[in-house]
Image (cartoon, rainbow, N blue to C red):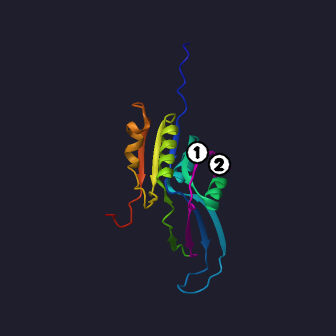
Amino acid sequence: MTPRSVPAPRMFVTVTPNPSLDRTVALPHLVRGEVHRAQSVRIDPGGKGVNVARALASAGHRTVALMPSGATPGERLAALLEPTDVTTVAVPITEATRVNITLVEPDGVTTKINEPGPRLSADEVEALMDRACALGAGATWLVGCGSLPRASATTSTPSWSGAAAGPACGSPSTPRTRRCTTPSRRPPTS
């Protein structure tokens, strides 16, 4: 019997440029302009790439979640991912990671309030892109998911989708890439 070569296990790297700490609040009913008492509150790690990483890990895949992380919400987000099978790589940023709020009523009506997220400096964007390239070099898939962070006054948001597949990562053997994008609801900048 001839031994067969065992393929190396797949590794997925997800890049979540605008992760969130998701707070879900259950209410008996929602009336605009009134004070409400929550029935329960749940806090979860969030952002499209984080959610993809969690799903891949739960299916048994080796997964690394790369994201910018700022202030207490960023620390809490990383702490919530610690007990999962997702390896977290946080790039420190100055501004706080966003916190999204979901209000849930008993009949299933859901109201979401998503913060825009932090502004990343040019150095923070570069650090995130550098880490994505470094991690992507050892991955089977490099997956970019979710909304993009706001650009600071001194930098513009780079072409995230082209960077990992192009020469910026320095290798023609760059892993396969896939974007999971959320249409931007922000007005175009001039």
Residue depicted at x 47% and y 47% = 126
- SS state under label 2: loop
* As drawn, 140 above or below 100: above
Identify the mark at residue 84; answer none if there is no mark: 2
For the C terminus, give its image quadrant: bottom left
- SS state under label 1: helix
C-alpha span from label 2 to label 1: 8 Å
Identify the mark at residue 19; answer none if there is no mark: none
- Nearer-N-terminus badge (2/1): 1
Residue depicted at x 56% and y 43% = 64
For the N terminus, give its image quadrant: top right
Q: Nearer the viewer, residue 108 or 156?
A: 156
Q: Which residues are magenta?
A: 81-106
Q: Position of residue 78 (x, y in %)?
A: 63, 53
* Amino acid at dot 2: Thr
Label 1 near label 2: C-beta < 8 Å? yes
Residue depicted at x 55% and y 32% = 9
**Quadrant position of residue 75:** bottom right
- Looking at the image, the residue that sits furthest to the top is 1
Identify the mark at residue 57; answer none if there is no mark: 1
Residue 94 is a magenta residue = yes
